[in-house]
Image (cartoon, rainbow, N blue to C red):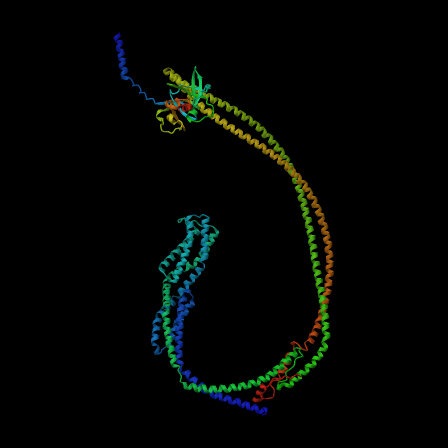
Amino acid sequence: MSNKEMSVASKLHSLLIACGTVACLAPALVGFNAQAQENAVSIETRFAAEEMRLIGRQVAASAWQSTQGQESTFQDLERRVAYFDEQKSIIDSDKLAKELSVVDVAWQPIKRAAQTLIDAGPQIVFTHEVVEKYGSQMDSMQSEFAEVADIVRVQKYGSVTNSTAQKNLWLNERINRNINRIFAGTGNVEKATQELQADSAELLGNLEALTRGDASREIRMITDPMAVEAMSSAFRKFSTVSTALSRIVGDAGDLREAAAARQTILSMTDSFDEALDSLVAGVDGLAVVGNEPSSLPVIYLVAPALVAFALLLMQFMSQRRRASYIKQGVTDINSALRKIAGGDLGVKVSEDNKALVEVARQINKSTSQQLELIQDIRGPFDLSVDEISKIGVSAKSLVEKGKELTRSVGESIAAATEMVRTSEEIKTSTVEAARTSDRNCQQVAQGYELTKDMSKASVDVRESVQETSKSAKRQGELIQSVTAAAEYIQALNTKISVVAINTRIEAEKAGEYGRPFLGIAEAIADLLREAGDEGRKIISEVRMLQNMSAENLASMENTVGTVVTILEYIDRLDGSLEEINSGSAAISSIIRSVDDAAGQSAVSALHMNSSMTQIRERNLEIGKVSESTVIGVGRLQRAMRDASESLGQFKPVGTPRVTGNETVQVEEVESIGVAPTVYREEDMTALEAGEPSRASV
Amino acid sequence: MSSQALQAVSMLEQAYAENVVPAPALAAAPMTWMGTSLGIAGTPLLVGEGEIDELVEIPAVTPIPGTKPWVMGVAAYMGGLLPIISGDVLFRQRPYAGRVREFCMVIRRPGFYFGITLSDVERNIKFPLEARDMDYPVDEDFANYTLGGFHDGDRFLAILDVEKLVADSNLSNAAIPAPVSNEETSDEQ
């Protein structure tokens, strides 16, 4: 069979398979469309039921979210309520009347509560904004009120002012709590409203009194700048509440009703979900009954489709085998050409594909010839590249060493400069030290004079104290003699007293005749009493005087000892000053020698600096020449490398290299396309079953 | 003449009787306690009027062997012998080695004639009798020989009752008790 005949037969075969497929699929398509038209109403109802269940849950979610005070929540709630009613109206089947009535019974209270929530939406949004803003400012306000209270307590503004400042803290706290309670709508809202009004008024009054003072309440005006600033800031923040207070109080009733409505919705959510689940289950039951088709039309639809599918599968498999055989041969040739383009001239193209055997044979022959030519040229180039690389390495190391030398010279110059600067500083410091040393010598001389004066004054003090001590000793002796005289007088008094007593006794013994003596004895006794008292007083005071004299004497002796000690210290100080003076002279001579050495060091460093500068300039010139050498060697090396790489692209055996020519060659090979020979089915089967054989050129 | 004179005298007497101013009533003199203020063994005491025979400087004393420690000895005084008793040892009942006493008071009672050394001699003194305090606590060593006392400023002066002192059996027998003889005991055995 010729190629033309085989092509016509293949086209005819494909045409027959296509016609058969169309004939089989047409009845199936017509039958499916009719069945879809029959089930349209049940799907809509089921969709509506599913939507109602979804919307019911969304309504509950919106009610729960309404506590967050977002305006969009109330808009969503209103839209969902309307959408629920719309979906409910779609379901009008008589079979679902019972489920619908249950849903409606659960829906109506939720709908009314949702409407209440929607009506109270603006109030909730407004109050929530106030609560949020006030709550966010609460910590800073409490801190400011606490700061005011601390300042009032520390600066002692008085107990009433202190208690007023402290009270602001818990007033602010209670206002925040009551606003939150009103917003939540729970608990005793009326009481919270009253407390909120009273607390706000009291807080404002307290701030006014603390700012301006209130004599009637005994509250002093706070003048501390930090406290005034804190109160002003707190007052500004509290304006959030004070400006919205009347509206919050007016909306308290609506907020409470909204909270009740929210609670109603949330409490009825479970029963409402159950009703909606029942409705969805009912709708599902109806949909299953409407979708039962007869078994005969299905058979009519499926059998032709299966026949058409089998025909199409056979056609596809035969075409696929043929194309893959030719594609395998082209792939082998392309792979070999890619390796040749990469320089791998040792590759061999397989010659066992009958459609492409000639092409493969010519490629193998040309690659063998090219390989022989390249191997003859490549050897000398590789040798040159290696030698130039060595020159480049040595030139680079030379440049690096030159740079290192330049850097070392630069560091040496910097060090020499630093040495010069240090020498100058040392010189300056030595001059200052010499000046200071001279001053020290002068001060030591002054101290020496002062010690002489002190020594003289101490000697005078010692002599004066010794004179005073002698005088005090004399005083003590006199006091001693006075004491002895006083004691003697006291003893005489005692004796006189004895005489007086005996006189009285004798007068008593003499009876009436001794009465005059009795009066005399009493008079003597009175005199003796007075004399005795005075005598005792004199003795006591004289003894006190004696003690004081003794203490004064001891104190003077201590003073003399102290003066003697001071004189010793002055002697030691004199010796120390002399040593300091000699040490200062030695330091001055050392400083002068250091100054000379620093000057010489500076001169040497300057000489070294100039020498280093010259070395650096020479080294820089050498570096420039070396860099030029390196650049030249690099260029030569790059040129040799390019030539070597160009030759190196042709490898006898090994890894291929990708070059720019590869794409062109591949494109040329791919442009060969499918072989002109058209094989029959039995030929292809024979080719696939045969042993793979590879021939080389 | 004489009758005229007598008449004139009687008239004068009558005139005086009619115009006489009654003499002022004598106020009752306050009762006072009088005595001597002195000290024995450092304790201030009072000795009542008539209790002391006299106060004398302690004369030279001759010790008497075999007497109690408070008997300092016997001194020759005004042609007789005067036993001298140490007030410090007698009342404190312990040896005394303090300042030498200079004076003693001589007490004379029937069967007693002796001098007691004094630590202090002050003066004659008198107190209102109603001011006597019989309950104020006194130094324990003198408590048995005192009978109340008077407050003088911030101190209390107890009254030494010489009669109690003389009645003390300890004072009436100045001899040391003789030691028990062992010989008699051995003889009896």
Q: Quadrant of residue A238?
A: bottom left
Q: Position of residue B97 (x, y in %)?
A: 47, 25
Q: Is residue B115 left or right of residue A433?
A: left
**Residue B179 visible at all:** no
Identify the residue at image location x=73%, y=56%: A610
**Is A514 placed above or below A554 here?**
above
Q: Name the quarter where the N terminus of chain A is drawn.
A: bottom right
Single out the residue that lies furthest toward the top: B1
Identify the residue at image location x=27%, y=9%: B5
Q: Position of residue A382 (x, y in %)?
A: 71, 73
Q: How many marks?
A: 0
Of residues B64 and A80, the one nearer the viewer is: B64
Q: Name the quarter where the C terminus of chain A is drawn.
A: bottom right
Q: Quadrant of residue A346?
A: bottom right
Q: Position of residue B142 (x, y in %)?
A: 39, 26
Of residues A236 and A36, the one nearer the viewer is: A36
Single out the residue that lies furthest toward the front: B189
Q: Is residue A124 left or right of residue A425?
A: left
Identify the residue at image location x=42%, y=63%: A128
**Is A146 placed above or below A35 here?**
above
